[in-house]
Amino acid sequence: MNIDELKNFEKPPQSYWMASTPETEYPVLNEDLKADIAIIGGGITGVLFAYLLGKEGLKAVVVEADRILQATTGHTTAKITSQHGLIYSKIKNQMGEEFAKQYADANESAIRMIGEIAKENSIECDYVSQSAYVYTLQNEYVNKISDEAKVASSLGIKAVCLDKTPLPFPVKAAVRFDNQAQFHPRKFLLPLAEKIAGSGGQIFEQTRIVNIEEDDGYALITDQGKKITAHRVIIASHYPCYNKTGLYFTRIYSERSYVIAIKAKEKYPGGMYITAEEPGRSLRSQISDDGELILVGGEHHKTGQGADTVKHYEALIDFADKTFTLEDIPYRWSTQDCMTLDGIPYVGHFTSKTPNMYIATGYGKWGMTNSMASAMLLKDLIVNGESPWQDVYNPSRQTIVASAKNFVVENFNVAEKLIEGKISPLPKDIDIKPGEGKIIEANGQRAGAYRDEQGTLHVVDTTCTHMGCELSWNSAEKSWDCPCHGSRFSYEGDVVEGPAVKPLNAHKDVNTIEKLIKDHF
Ligand code: FES
């Protein structure tokens, strides 16, 4: 196939992890329930945490708005590594050596724990030990790479600085961490979910929590009006679904990034890679039933602010084409990550005023080990009252000197997008071809119109149901995305990603809009 044929995006995106595993079918919650521990969110964190609690003899209820292990967990690159870019020098400089040590210990322990759980439960999950590399093609990053190797080594990580890697192109420098790993996340987690459900825990799918009230502990209200009364609540819903306190929406922003799974003529040289600089590029391989896939990732941008999102897949294809002899691209997918102001996740007590409410979020693209570390940390807080890593992950940490600037930048950006969305002029071109989505004016108001491949027009009110920002069209995933806090909606208006919990209003007057478009031409 030539490069233009490979850039044909007619087929919708699909992740290899999703395509190679069965869908789950846990029930919808259809009655009120009492539980000791309720976990909101059935991603990797919720499942690992419920599993660890089960080992302590504690039963948890996991509630998932959609299907478990599908959202970010089903759309990752699945690297099990404590190497999160050049993070150790950054934490040491901004927060001190003790915090850097806690972060290193947490993530190295997480690597070991994932291996142990897979072994203990005889889970076949394509687990392979690998080295992880951060490399640079730029001279100005060479010292940063060598500093990272020194700091990481001083924290007990097996790290070494190199001037070449096994990749088929020269680099200026690289830092390699040994004893890291890769796996198939759903092959690992689906059996654990079955174990939870089979040992007294409960999992409910397609059950969205739309409100949390204080009521003899907490009362979680579902979108179907049912109530879960729980003594302890863990919010592991990716972007927190509770905003009455904690102001998390002022200190988390959402980013999207992209992956293509390619087939190449040459064999992949082994290892997991990421660039130190922009544009970010990530590489690893995966054995599939149909031979070797190479996962090429990168191209991050703030959700709802990525311009023509199809261009991000094209950029990855161009990179893959320069690096390997590209034969096919059987899978491509994108994902969403929650980012914190200082790059360290928020894991621990939700706030000091919400006893028995906990949070785990903000993994900043490093969710495989951070989720395992979070599950271990939260289990320790609940069972022992403390964790050796609680300070570095503390959601209320006071070490945010460096991130005070980021707080201003991020919140200015939200305010700017809120205003810009309301006043920016509407496009004059209102022709909408099949597969195309656009903001148009309908009856004097902004509306989002998408014409599906069969020619049917779908029109929604593009005001985000979270806090009122105006949505933008994501051409790669055919969704309406919010530039403020990252909520996403299908072209029919259903919530795809929170923090929004309510769907968009559908425009009732689609026929009038269709007539308006016809009259215009
Ligand atoms: Fe907050 Fe849209 S996600 S306004």
Image (cartoon, grey):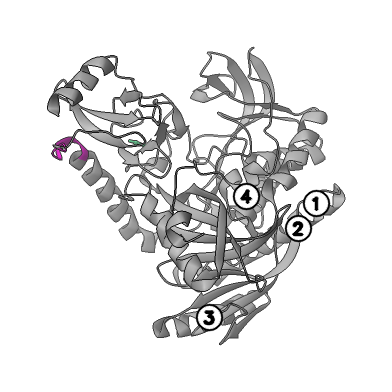
Determine if residue 58 is in view.
no
Q: Earlier in the sequence, mark 1 or mark 3?
A: 1
Highlighted range, magenta: 421-427
Q: According to the image, label 2 marks what residue?
A: 127
Q: Residue at x 21, y 16 (%)?
A: 512
| Image quarter of residue 205 | top right
Q: Earlier in the sequence, mark 1 or mark 2?
A: 1
Please report contact status of discs 4 and 2: CB closer than 8 Å, yes or no: no
Q: According to the image, label 4 marks what residue?
A: 371
Residue 442 in the image, given as x and y percentages of width and height: 19, 23
Q: Nearer the viewer, mark 4 or mark 3?
A: 3
Magenta run includes residue 423: yes
Q: Is residue 455 left or right of residue 101?
A: left
Along the line of sight, which residue is nearer the eye, 294 or 1?
A: 1
Please report contact status of discs 1 and 2: CB closer than 8 Å, yes or no: yes
Any mark on residue 517, and which? none
| Image quarter of residue 176 | bottom right
Q: Earlier in the sequence, mark 4 or mark 3?
A: 3
Q: Is residue 238 left or right of residue 513?
A: right
Magenta run includes residue 447: no
Q: Nearer the viewer, mark 1 or mark 2?
A: 2
C-alpha span from label 4 to label 3:
33 Å
C-alpha span from label 4 to label 2:
17 Å
Picture mark count: 4
Q: Nearer the viewer, mark 1 or mark 3?
A: 3
Any mark on residue 169, and which? 3
